[in-house]
Image (tube, rainbow, N blue to C red):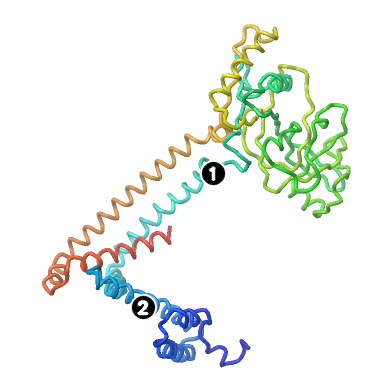
């Protein structure tokens, strides 16, 4: 059908349907018939694409004028503003604004480039600011997730704990917290027919339940998987599952080689899953695979990043008081802490993750906002200088009967055209 000449001369069906449905019954055949006839002439003369664009412009313009006429007649009876005239004048003002700006291309280009640079930079920085600082973490009830920070005198890895200290927290801090999970991010070698280096994380069995993340295939870790004598199991990410194993569900139960050990795949985690890594600081990172954390007995081997979730209704201040009490009990219970200032505190997980970049981003956003202010000031100065140069033109138009409102709308139309062009360029 689309190959026939008659079909190519038909106007856009959606636009025709809108006209037929929204126009008054008495005007449908007259208006739609004229538009269709003009469309066919333009299609033969200028091409089908240009004719369709013209038909859509006429459709929108016709419907707006009809709507403005209805609103204007209603409001005129009540002494309101004449919307019909306003809509008619708007098109005139925009066309006049384009003509005036074509006469001053240097001014128009300067304003558009200035706005584009300022708005483009501001939008880019705000996008980064929103993604890093404002967007909540991709976990269930993320506002109740906290990071446990340790401060040990004479110990350089501030903020991390050892596995025995994690066990102490699970045993002693049960009033304000739902649980504690340990995470240590590293890397490893996936062996086999096609060896590759992957991002790997050791996590305690309760990490994913604590974050509120479920596997898309198989199961998550169980508490027994943390025991040294248990079977070696691994969770793999969806991206690795699709890339290396072709998204085969039979991967469950398959033995894979990681470093010098063999592990059984028990589950597949969602794609783009980001887990806070441990070591010197917590940060969100994507991993290809996760292994259950095997506990070490050395209390001085601190490398686990610890996260927790507050119980509903528990304030951060109460959680910190409980951690302070636990730190005091540990200092008194173990001789290894004698002479050390050992402290524990809880901070919102999101705030802990972004604490390193927050000052730089805030300073950068302030600088960009200042640049935007300078750009707006420069644009305002250019337009004011242009307005001073058009004093005689405005005086003549005023003498011929133009009202202050009409003159103001013409000037605003020029500003609107420049703002839209600068925004699109930015």
The x and y percentages for residue 83 are 29, 71
Q: Residue at x 53, y 24 (%)?
A: 317
* Position above or below: 30 against 110: below
Q: Residues within 10 Å of mark 2 (few under 14, many from 20)?
A: some
Q: Quadrant of the C terminus?
A: bottom left
Number of numbered tags placed on the structure image: 2
Q: Nearer the viewer, residue 335 or 187?
A: 335
Q: Nearer the viewer, residue 296 or 148?
A: 148
Question: What residue sits right under mark 1 in the picture?
Answer: 135
In what element is the residue under mark 2? helix
The x and y percentages for residue 342 are 61, 14
For discs 2 and 1, the disc positioned in front in the rendered view: 2
The x and y percentages for residue 315 are 54, 27
- Residue 66 numbered mark, or none: 2
Query: Gap in Å between the C-alphas at discs 2 and 1?
Result: 44 Å
In what element is the residue under mark 1? loop
Q: Nearer the viewer, residue 243 or 329?
A: 329
The x and y percentages for residue 158 are 61, 22
* In this rendering, position of residue 38 left or right of residue 268: left
């Amino acid at each position: 059908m689309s190959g026939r000449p008659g079909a190519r001369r038909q106007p856009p069906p959606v636009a025709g349907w809108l006209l037929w449905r929204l126009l008054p019954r008495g005007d449908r055949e007259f208006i739609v018939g004229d538009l269709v006839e003009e469309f066919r002439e333009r299609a033969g003369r200028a091409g089908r694409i240009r004719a369709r664009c013209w038909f859509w412009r006429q459709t929108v313009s016709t419907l707006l004028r009809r709507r403005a006429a209805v609103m204007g007649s209603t409001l005129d009876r009540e002494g309101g503003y004449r919307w019909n005239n306003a809509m008619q004048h708007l098109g005139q003002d925009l066309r006049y604004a384009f003509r005036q700006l074509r006469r001053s291309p240097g001014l128009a280009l300067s304003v558009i480039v200035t706005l584009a640079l300022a708005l483009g930079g501001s939008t880019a920085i705000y996008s980064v600011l929103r993604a890093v600082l404002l967007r909540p973490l991709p976990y269930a009830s993320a506002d109740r997730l906290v990071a446990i920070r340790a401060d040990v005198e004479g110990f350089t890895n501030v903020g991390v704990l050892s596995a025995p200290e994690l066990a102490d927290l699970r045993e002693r801090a049960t009033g304000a917290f739902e649980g504690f999970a340990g995470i240590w991010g590293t890397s490893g070698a996936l062996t086999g027919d096609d060896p590759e280096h992957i991002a790997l994380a050791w996590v305690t069995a309760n990490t994913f339940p604590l974050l509120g993340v479920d596997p898309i295939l198989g199961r998550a870790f169980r508490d027994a998987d943390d025991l040294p004598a248990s079977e070696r199991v691994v969770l793999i990410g969806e991206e690795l599952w699709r890339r290396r194993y072709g998204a085969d569900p039979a991967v469950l139960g398959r033995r894979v080689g990681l470093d010098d050990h063999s592990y059984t795949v028990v589950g597949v985690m969602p794609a783009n899953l980001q887990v806070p890594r441990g070591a010197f600081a917590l940060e969100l990172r994507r991993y290809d695979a996760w292994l259950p954390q095997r506990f070490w007995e050395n209390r001085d081997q601190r490398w686990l990043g610890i996260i927790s979730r507050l119980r509903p209704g528990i304030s951060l201040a109460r959680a910190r008081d409980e951690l302070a009490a636990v730190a005091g009990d540990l200092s008194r219970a173990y001789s290894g802490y004698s002479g050390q200032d050992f402290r524990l505190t809880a901070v919102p997980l999101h705030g802990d993750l972004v604490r390193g970049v927050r000052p730089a981003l805030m300073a950068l956003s302030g600088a960009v906002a200042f640049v935007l202010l300078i750009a707006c000031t420069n644009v305002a100065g250019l337009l004011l200088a242009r307005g001073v140069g058009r004093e005689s033109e405005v005086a003549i138009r005023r003498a011929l009967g133009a009202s202050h409102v009409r003159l103001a709308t013409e000037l605003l139309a020029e500003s609107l055209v420049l703002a839209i062009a600068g925004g699109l360029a930015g």
